[in-house]
Image (spheres, rainbow, N blue to C red):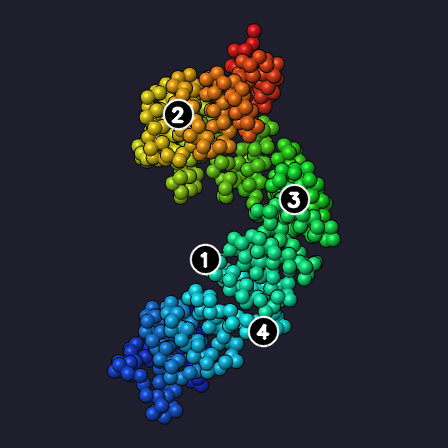
């Protein structure tokens, strides 16, 4: 409800009552009604008409000035008294507004019902009662009232049906909203808009099949209605993706220019990893709408998925150049990555610096800091991370971990460890800091501290797969306590079965235990999920040990091309080279 502290409301009420519109607050000596001071209502029926009007004007002034001074309770009581004595529609409407503002829904309902009893044909009274019942969450009483309102405005019935869900958009009980809208729409089942409204409510309540059923009925009644097609596709995307794709393709056969339907189809195809089909749809979309920012951005992301960086760059640059891109920060971030991969470092740094908000803000700062470190500007890089804008403690921790990682990558492991130790002293129970400091302790050959930290982390976060994995991998890499290492990694795998790093650890501990076939299976699954130089080195070593030297050489050479800066791959190659 809009703020009700306004003298314009007072002026409107006084005009409606036939009183002068000028109201001088100074003319009211005290915020107390003489009648209420005596503990009894004013006997207005015994007063002359002029005195009755004066009494009403006085109480209107009393209530409105009370509102201005923050005395809501007095305003509610004054208006409730006026509504009971005058039964004037304007007074009753204002009473309902003030009572609603004060969250006196019981009083607001009483007045609204009294108004409707006085004037059963009043649309305004009915709508006020609907509003009060909705605010007080008494949805089970609303259906008859809403049906009457819809019937009274037959000329705008389709439009009003579509507005039902907006009316209850803030109500958290989505199941109750669905039941209400379903009941209200029953008398109008011949209209596509009624089925659309029910479908939307069902979708909000998590009733996917019911939502799809109603969306299909809406489309049957209005086969050309793109909104209904979109709703059917959207509700199917969650748990019936094949149906979503089929519905989109069917609609596009007869409506090839339905841009939003084609865009949803392209995204559904990406979700099914049908990238070539998705690319075909995006090409069609871009031919028809070359300057649509949403299409350009999605098509650029698909080009990145295909590793077509030149095409992705062209589309992202076009997206930014439009000047109306809704997410230019993300575009600059990806353009920075493309430039960095192409060794256009100055351009990459410029792009990262232009990311000033959004989900890629902190990653862009981290990448920019890494490039500064690579140029020998470590102080600038560290200051960049420390000056990043964030009010979230967890993001501040991530920036600190990133700073330590840059120090470690620069060979300053002891400095990185000491830095994290200081941060851990400030947050001794922080799991992320504890984990990273444990890994650095291992790098410094302080195995005892690493083990202490990781076991403490397991106590604090028994559902944290990375703690189990790190400890198990540390044992496996040292070729010690292998049965325990396997148990730890199995626990990590049970918590995160598709994690590439944990699959790599399992492959590595199985290799140490001599189970080469199973080790190969895990490492291949790991490398399929995430191409990483260390995983490639492990996989190459297993292949070599199994006697598949040519396969090992081919894999390691291909990995070296992908990761030219990796230190672990050349080392592995040297160990195997004659």
- Quadrant of image for the C terminus: top right
Asked whether residue 71 is in view, the answer is yes
Precedes in sequence: disc 3 or disc 2: 3
Q: Residue at x 45, y 79 (%)?
A: 115
Crowd band around label 3 with a 10 angstrom C-alpha radius: few (<14), some (14–19), many (20+): many
Q: What element carries label 2?
A: helix
Report which residue position mark 4 lands on: 151
Q: Distance between the residues labelled 4 and 1?
A: 27 Å
In the foreground, 327 or 548: 548
Report which residue position mark 2 lands on: 471
Q: How far apart are marks 2 and 4 (CA)?
A: 69 Å
Q: Residue at x 70, y 52 (%)?
A: 251
- Expressed as whole percent of the image width and height from the top left, the position of residue 503 reads 49, 27
In the foreground, 409 or 220: 220
- Expressed as whole percent of the image width and height from the top left, the position of residue 515 reads 49, 18
Report which residue position mark 3 lands on: 266
Q: Specify whether 91 is left or right of 567.
A: left
Precedes in sequence: disc 2 or disc 1: 1
- Expressed as whole percent of the image width and height from the top left, the position of residue 318 reads 65, 42
Q: How far apart are marks 3 and 1 (CA)?
A: 32 Å
- Quadrant of image for the N terminus: bottom left
* For residue 163, above or below residue 386: below
Q: Is mark 3 on a helix, strand or loop?
A: helix
- Disc number for residue 172: 1
């Amino acid at each position: 409800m809009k703020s009700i502290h306004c003298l314009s409301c007072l002026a409107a009420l006084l005009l409606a009552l036939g009183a002068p519109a000028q109201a001088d607050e100074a003319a009211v000596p005290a915020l107390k009604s003489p009648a209420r001071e005596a503990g009894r209502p004013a006997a207005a029926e015994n007063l002359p008409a002029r005195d009755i009007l004066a009494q009403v004007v006085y109480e209107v002034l009393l209530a409105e000035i009370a509102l201005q001074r923050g005395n809501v309770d007095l305003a509610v009581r004054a208006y409730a008294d006026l509504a009971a004595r005058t039964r004037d529609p304007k007074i009753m409407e204002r009473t309902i507004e003030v009572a609603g503002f004060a969250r006196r829904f019981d009083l607001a309902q009483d007045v609204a019902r009294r108004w409707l009893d006085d004037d059963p044909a009043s649309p305004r009274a009915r709508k006020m009662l609907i509003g009060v019942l909705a605010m007080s969450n008494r949805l089970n009483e609303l259906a008859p009232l809403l049906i009457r309102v819809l019937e009274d405005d037959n000329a705008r019935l389709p439009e009003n049906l579509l507005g039902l869900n907006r009316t209850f958009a803030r109500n958290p009980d989505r199941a109750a909203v669905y039941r209400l809208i379903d009941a209200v729409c029953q008398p109008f089942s011949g209209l596509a808009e009624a089925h659309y409204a029910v479908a939307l409510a069902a979708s909000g309540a998590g009733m996917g099949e019911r939502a799809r059923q109603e969306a299909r009925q809406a489309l049957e009644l209005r086969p050309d209605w793109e909104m209904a097609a979109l709703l059917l596709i959207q509700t199917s995307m969650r748990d019936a993706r094949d149906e979503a794709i089929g519905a989109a393709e069917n609609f596009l056969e007869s409506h090839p220019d339905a841009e939003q339907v084609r865009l949803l189809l392209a995204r559904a195809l990406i979700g099914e990893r049908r990238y070539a089909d998705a690319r075909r749809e995006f090409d069609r979309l871009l031919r028809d709408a070359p300057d649509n920012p949403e299409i350009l951005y999605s098509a650029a992301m698909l080009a990145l998925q295909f590793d077509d960086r030149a095409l992705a760059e062209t589309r992202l640059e076009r997206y930014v150049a439009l000047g109306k891109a809704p997410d230019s920060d993300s575009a600059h971030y990806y353009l920075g990555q493309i430039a960095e991969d192409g060794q256009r470092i100055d351009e990459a740094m410029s792009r990262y610096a232009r990311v000033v908000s959004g989900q890629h803000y902190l990653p862009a700062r981290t990448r920019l800091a890494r490039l500064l470190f690579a140029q020998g500007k470590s102080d600038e890089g560290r200051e960049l991370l420390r000056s990043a804008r964030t009010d979230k403690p967890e993001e501040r921790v991530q920036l600190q971990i990133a700073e330590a990682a840059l120090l470690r990558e620069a060979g300053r492991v002891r400095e990185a460890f000491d830095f994290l130790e200081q941060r851990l002293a400030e947050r001794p129970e922080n799991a992320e800091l504890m984990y990273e400091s444990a890994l650095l302790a291992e790098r410094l050959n302080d195995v005892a501290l690493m083990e202490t930290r990781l076991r403490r982390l397991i106590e604090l976060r028994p559902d944290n797969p990375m703690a189990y994995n790190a400890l198990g991998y540390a044992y496996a890499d040292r070729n010690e306590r292998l049965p325990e290492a396997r148990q730890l990694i199995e626990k990590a795998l049970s918590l995160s079965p598709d994690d590439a790093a944990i699959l790599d650890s399992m492959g590595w501990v199985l290799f140490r235990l001599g189970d080469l076939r199973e080790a190969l299976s895990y490492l291949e699954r790991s490398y399929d999920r995430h191409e990483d130089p260390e995983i490639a080195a492990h996989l190459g070593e297993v292949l070599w040990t199994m006697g598949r030297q040519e396969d090992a050489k081919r894999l390691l050479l291909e990995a070296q091309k992908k990761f030219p800066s990796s230190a672990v791959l050349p080392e592995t190659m040297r160990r195997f080279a004659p």
